[in-house]
Image (tube, rainbow, N blue to C red):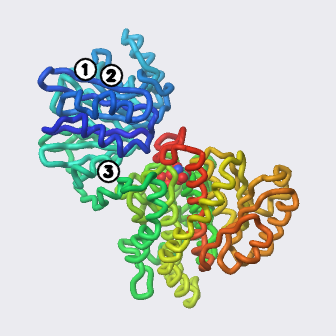
Amino acid sequence: MCGIVGYVGSEQAAPILLEGLSKLEYRGYDSAGVAVYDGETGRLTVRKSKGRLKVLSDMLDGGASVAGRIGVGHTRWATHGAPSDVNSHPQLSRSGRIAVVHNGIIENYAELKAYLQEQGIPFTSETDTEVVAQLIEHFYEGDLLQAVGRCLRRIEGAYALGIVCADAPDEIVAVRKDSPLILGYGEGCSFLASDVTAILRHTRRVSYLDDGEAAVLTRDGIQCYNHLMQPIEKEICHVDWEVDAAEKGGYEHFMFKEIMEQPEALRRCVLPRIRNGEVVLEDFRLDGEYLRSVRKLYIIACGSSYHVGMLGKYSLERILRLPVEVSLASEFRYMDPIVDEGTLAIVISQSGETLDTLAAMREAKRLGAKTLSIVNVVGSSIARESDQVIYTWAGPEIAVATTKAFTTQLAVVTLLGLYLARRLGTMEETEYKSVLEELLALPEKMEAVLANRDGLQYYASQYFNHDSVFFIGRNIDYAMGMEGSLKLKEISYIHSEAYASGELKHGTISLIEDGTLVVALCTYHKLFDKAMSNIVEVKARGGDVLALTTEGKREELGKTANGVFAIPEAHPLLLPCLGTVPLQLFAYYVALMRGCDIDKPRNLAKSVTVE
Ligand code: M6R
């Protein structure tokens, strides 16, 4: 959570920092601030405010009211201390000469604060970050990097830090451990940011700091250091994301734009990976001998990515005939999992920075597993630390509610399944070819779903004021329902639950009464009759049923359900990719009608880099 940005160069820093922060607001948005050093006056100006970035931007006249060519900025998702002006970042040292922006959590901050207070150092905020600013000043003897190094030896936890000091007015010091930090190389200027989208307008040349590394940014360039503060060279990568991809481009919300971008994202993800009737995964380093030794797949992820994992279990077990376990990363970390050299851990994360997922991946590695990650953000921590990465190539996803990253993750899981099946000889040729053909047809079918979206808007208008919604389904429809339910609750704030239809009679059915909305998913033909029985049970208790099925079953369902939305027919392995789209649109329209802040739902952040 939290977004940080830094700039040093010949332009005025504040407008650049504010513009960068506007791209990072998805990471946290309860307060924002900047610290800018003005060489003319020798002053470090800090401006910060509770509330959205706009409050700060208006306060600073878009940045025009703060002079200076070097500075750092922050957008916050509160951890220590409520959202307030005083708890906003940057946090200052006692003298006001050192300013720090921070993403992460300093776990031993209380102990350090007590130590500093004993030395007579007063604190003004409740944040863990203020400890860092005070500690650096405590150690400062004329060399900022050295003081930061000493501070790092004392702090424990996760951090990406940007530090400016009025006594070192030409440089920004940046360090990271377990929180993302990107360095940007411009012409006569340098940048730091939590995410590349914040600096894409200015440079495409970036490098990624690794854990324990530090950097000193000046207008002439960037010098990086290892954990011993010895100079090192970092590889500079070229980012080829389009600048516009991180803009709304005429859409009212990023979420809607990203929903509509899904066919294109799928084309980008799938087409280059199918050549001459075969799945080609370039740079795939896990060799045949290793793959044949794998006895179990363990999928690890959080939130929507976890739902991809649940869907992946159905598809990978079917394709590979290998046992697949799926675990929430936050649970995996502490459950003493049965993982060894015979386990391939598949780690799924859009951001590639989710702390629980990263930690779980490290744990899987420690236990002997090899790790394969499915990630959207190129160069992210999970991508870099896994033994093998497969990128989803969905392009930047800004809305907190994931959409195109989700469907491309599903596509990658299918590609991976096919690729492994070929190596392990577990799939019939005809089945392999038919899934490949269906994969290629997927973007077009998705376009057809999107073109029919009016029907979903109509259903949303009928049900947007309900307080509670249930999603039911069996097998893949159940896992899809979990995603539909999460999408709805996270952006519309309607209470919603997903249940395996067969579980209704074991408790949940007692909640169904006159007018209760139940979204029944029945795309999986094999279990259609069973799904119908559950729908009838719900109807018998007065529930309203909105059903999602495929074209071939539309008529039959229409006789029983209050409303039906149909997707094109598809291979069962690919149905979830199509079926999720109407659920995304339904959630979107409901949230729109309820007047919710769709791209930035309350209490949430896009990238969850705290435990
Ligand atoms: O970046 P990740 O895929 O690791 O994020 C995991 C979850 O935080 C994420 O999927 C979250 O559940 C989404 N906001 C749901 O739309």
SS of the residue under disc 2: strand
Q: In the image, what residue occupies the spot 39% across and 23% down?
A: 131
Out of 464 and 116, give the one closest to the viewer.
Answer: 464
Judging by the rendered image, the residue that carries numbered circle 3 is 196
- Describe the element under mark 3 as helix, strand or loop: helix
Residue at the disc numbered 1: 97
* Residue type highlighted by circle 1: Arg
Residue drawn at (35%, 48%) of the image: 195
Where does residue 496 sit, x and y in percent of width and height? 69, 50
For marks 1 and 3, give the one nearer the viewer.
3
For marks 2 and 3, give the CA distance. 26 Å
**Residue 11 appears in view:** yes
Mark 2 or mark 1, earlier in chain: 2
Residue drawn 46% across and 27% down?
A: 108
Residue 596 figure quarter: top right
Q: Which mark is residue 92?
A: 2
Residue at position x 64%, y 55% in the image: 461
